Image: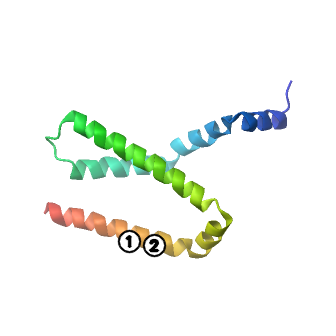
C-alpha cells in the first residue's frame, strides 16, 4: 500500500494537484458570493428582451474574463515582492475596492429610479 506522502508527490509530479484546490475554490462561500453578484448585476443591466444567444455569449464572456483575471492575479500575488506589498497595503486596497463597488451599486440604484 502506498504511503500518503508518496501519493501526494506522485500527484504533484503528474499535474493532478490542481483538482483539490479547484474543488475547494468552487465550493467556497466566496464563489457563491461571486455567482450571486453576477446574477444580480446581469439582472439589473441586461435588457429583458435580449436574445438568448446574446445572453449566453455575455455569460460565457464574463466567465472567461473572471477565469483569466483570477489566474493573472494569483500569478502576480504569488511573487514575493507582491505578497510583501499586499501584506502591508492589503487592508487599504480592499477598502478602496469596496468603496468603488458600493459607489457603482448606488449609481445603478439611482439610475433605475
Label 1: which residue? 99
Q: Is residue 21 left or right of residue 98?
A: right
Identified at 35% across, 44% down, the residue is 61
Estimate the x, y position of residue 111 in percent, counting from the top left. 16, 64
Q: Is residue 29 left or right of residue 58?
A: right
Q: Are marks 1 and 2 in contact (CB under 8 Å)?
A: yes
Label 2: which residue? 95
Q: Is residue 23 left or right of residue 12?
A: left
Identified at 25% across, 39% down, the residue is 55
- If the image is split into quadrants, where does the N terminus sit? top right
Q: Residue furthest top?
A: 1
Estimate the x, y position of residue 106 in percent, counting from the top left. 26, 67
Estimate the x, y position of residue 4 in percent, counting from the top left. 82, 34
Q: Nearer the viewer, residue 46 or 24?
A: 46
Identified at 65% across, 71% down, the residue is 84
Identified at 17% across, 41% down, the residue is 50
Q: Is residue 52 left or right of residue 29?
A: left
Q: Nearer the viewer, residue 62 or 1?
A: 62
Name the disc covering residue 5, or none: none
Estimate the x, y position of residue 7 in percent, counting from the top left. 79, 33
Q: Is residue 27 visible?
A: no
- How was this image coloured? rainbow
Which type of secondary structure does the marked residue at label 2 adopt? Answer: helix
Amino acid at each position: 500500500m502506498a504511503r500518503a506522502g508518496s501519493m501526494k508527490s506522485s500527484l504533484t509530479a503528474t499535474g493532478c494537484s490542481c483538482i483539490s484546490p479547484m474543488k475547494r475554490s468552487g465550493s467556497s462561500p466566496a464563489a457563491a458570493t461571486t455567482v450571486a453578484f453576477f446574477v444580480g448585476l446581469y439582472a439589473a443591466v441586461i435588457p429583458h428582451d435580449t436574445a438568448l444567444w446574446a445572453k449566453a455569449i455575455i455569460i460565457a464572456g464574463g466567465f472567461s474574463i473572471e477565469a483569466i483575471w483570477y489566474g493573472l492575479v494569483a500569478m502576480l500575488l504569488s511573487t514575493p515582492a507582491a505578497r510583501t506589498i499586499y501584506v502591508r497595503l492589503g487592508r487599504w486596497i480592499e477598502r478602496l475596492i469596496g468603496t468603488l463597488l458600493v459607489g457603482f451599486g448606488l449609481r445603478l440604484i439611482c439610475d433605475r429610479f
